[in-house]
């Protein structure tokens, strides 16, 4: 992890591309930014990928992602933000 001049965090690493595991590990870079909201301000975040999406609205986050190859299914999971900022699987979401 590297903190950039503007305060963002640059994460670099390697991981297996699960759609092409025979190609081995590939490098990646992600940039993370903390957002501070004013009291009463609301925000929604949507992350879209080729295999699905993850949506966060307030204390709730839900992901729908493709599992395996074409026609093999989807994985659906939801999380709720807890009192101390920890995320846990939400009851009754999936």
Image (cartoon, rainbow, N blue to C red):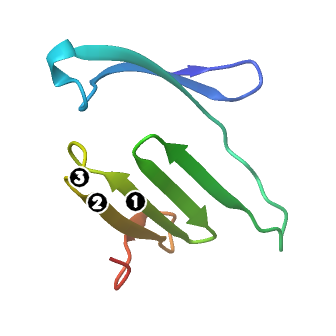
The reply, left or right, for residue 5 in relation to residue 62 is right
- In this picture, is 40 found above or below 92? above
The image quarter in which residue 18 lies: top left
Q: Earlier in the sequence, mark 3 or mark 1?
A: 1
Instruction: Identify which residue, 34 or 48, lies in the foreground.
Output: 48
At label 1, counting other C-alpha atoms closer than 10 Å, the crowd grade (few under 14, some 14-19, many 20 or more) is: some
Within the image, what quadrant is residue 17 found in?
top left
Q: From the viewer's perspective, is residue 14 above or below residue 34? A: above
Label 3 vs label 2: CA separation? 12 Å
The answer to whether 31 appears left or right of 82 in the picture is right
Choose between 69 and 53: the one closer to the eye.
69
| Residue 71 marker | 3
For label 1, the residue is: 64
| Disc 2 target residue | 75
Q: Nearer the viewer, mark 3 or mark 2?
A: 3
The C terminus, quarter of image: bottom left
For numbered disc 3, what is the local secondary structure? loop
Residues at marks 3 and 1 touching, judged by CB atoms closer than 8 Å:
no
Where in the figure is residue 35, as x and y percent of width and height?
73, 48
Tell me how far mark 1 sits from mark 2, CA to CA: 6 Å
* Residue 9, horizontal then vertical, whole percent: 60, 28
- The correct choice, above or below, for 50 with respect to 26 in the image is below
Q: In this rendered view, identify the residue nearer to me: 23 or 40.
A: 23
Image position, residue 53 (x, y; %): 48, 53
Q: Residue furthest bottom?
A: 92
Dot 3: within a 10 Å radius of its alpha carbon, few (fewer than 14), some, or many (20 or more) residues?
few
What's the mark number on residue 18?
Answer: none
Which class describes the residues within 10 Å of circle 2: few (<14), some (14-19), or many (20+)? few
Q: Are marks 1 and 2 in contact (CB under 8 Å)?
A: yes
Q: How far apart are marks 3 and 1 (CA)?
A: 14 Å
Q: Position of residue 15 (x, y in %)?
A: 29, 24
């Amino acid at each position: 992890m590297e903190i950039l001049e503007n305060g963002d965090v640059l994460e670099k690493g390697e991981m297996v591309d699960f759609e092409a595991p025979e190609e081995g590990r590939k490098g990646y870079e992600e940039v993370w930014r903390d957002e501070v909201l004013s009291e009463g301000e609301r925000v929604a975040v949507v992350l879209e990928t080729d295999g699905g999406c993850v949506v966060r609205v307030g204390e709730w986050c839900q992901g729908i992602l493709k599992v395996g190859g074409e026609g093999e299914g989807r994985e659906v999971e939801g999380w709720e933000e807890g009192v101390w900022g920890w995320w846990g699987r939400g009851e009754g979401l999936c």
